[in-house]
Amino acid sequence: MSRPASPRQDRPSSTPPVTPAAPVPLAPADVERFFATLAALSPEPKGELEYLNPFTLLVAVVLSAQATDKGVNRATGPLFQVADTPAKMVALGEEALRGYIRTIGLFNTKARNVIALSQALIDEHGGEVPCDRAALETLPGVGRKTANVVLNIAFGQPTMAVDTHIFRVANRTGLAPGKTPLAVEIGLEAVIPEGYRLHAHHWLILHGRYVCKARKPECPLCPVRDCCGFPDKTLAL
């Protein structure tokens, strides 16, 4: 006969859980100072995915889902030497493509999507990557975030691709709190001054990746700490 559970296991904790303090929403002047500071430090920020043209950028972004940029770059360097157009990618074929991207997570699904989107580009867009979000989102493996990255980098459109870094920074700093990536995207587009919108996507990603980190943000080294609404700033590294 099994022993009954200790009654202590059913007792509520005497110490209530600590709820993190909400960030302080940033005033327009603070938002301006936030991006002016990042712009001064990096006037022409660049993404870290390596590509040769809009098609290879699209492929790289599709492959980067749940993978690191460095890992994708290691695989796509050799791949893009042999397949840098939709026609060459289709000719390469799914099996050979899997061999190039085997080190990337979910490579089987991604290989199917890359071949399918390459064929769709040939059949529906004359082999060219469309510069329209709705058209991009009809391609296999392409969602709103991927479309926004391509539109921003390849076509110079001031889109906001909300990844985990941007989502965290927008919520933590008070720039544009939101419960979903779309809510954060809309919020950021509403508050970022027009002169910063083209590069804001890259500034926020790089800031989240290297300074405003998930587990322990490097607040003492943060160049925008004085215009950030995060109430629990770290005091030491």
Image: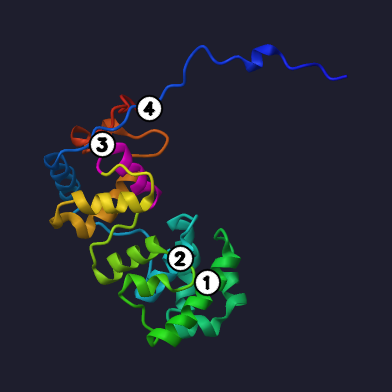
Q: Which of the marked residues, 2 or 1, is nearer the chain's N terminus? A: 2
Report the predominant secondary structure element of the magenta stretch. Answer: helix
Residue that label 4 marks: 20
Where does the N terminus fall, quadrant-wise?
Answer: top right
Residue that label 2 marks: 62
Instruction: Identify the magenta region.
Output: 163-175
Q: Classify residue 44 as left or right of residue 19.
A: left
**Location of residue 31 with respect to 151 vertically, above or below:** above
Q: CA distance from mark 4 to mark 1?
A: 40 Å
Identity of the residue drawn at 35% across and 28% down: 237
Q: CA distance from mark 1 to mark 3?
A: 39 Å
**Location of residue 62 with respect to 210 vertically, above or below:** below
Q: CA distance from mark 2 to mark 1?
A: 8 Å
**Viewer-nearest of discs 4 and 2:** 4
**x and y, in percent, of residue 28 in the image:** 13, 42
* Amino acid type, label 4: Pro
Q: What is the secondary structure assignment of the residue under circle 1? A: helix
**x and y, in percent, of residue 212 in the image:** 33, 39
Q: Which of the marked residues, 4 or 1, is nearer the chain's N terminus? A: 4
* Amino acid type, label 3: Cys
Q: What is the secondary structure assignment of the residue under circle 3? A: loop
**Viewer-nearest of discs 3 and 2:** 2
* Amino acid type, label 1: Asn
Q: CA distance from mark 3 to mark 2?
A: 31 Å
Residue that label 3 marks: 222
* Amino acid type, label 2: Val
- The stretch drawn in magenta includes residue 99: no
Q: Nearer the viewer, residue 39 or 200?
A: 200
Residue that label 1 marks: 113
> Can residue 205 be seen here?
no
Q: Are marks 2 and 1 in contact (CB under 8 Å)?
A: yes
**x and y, in percent, of residue 31 in the image:** 17, 43
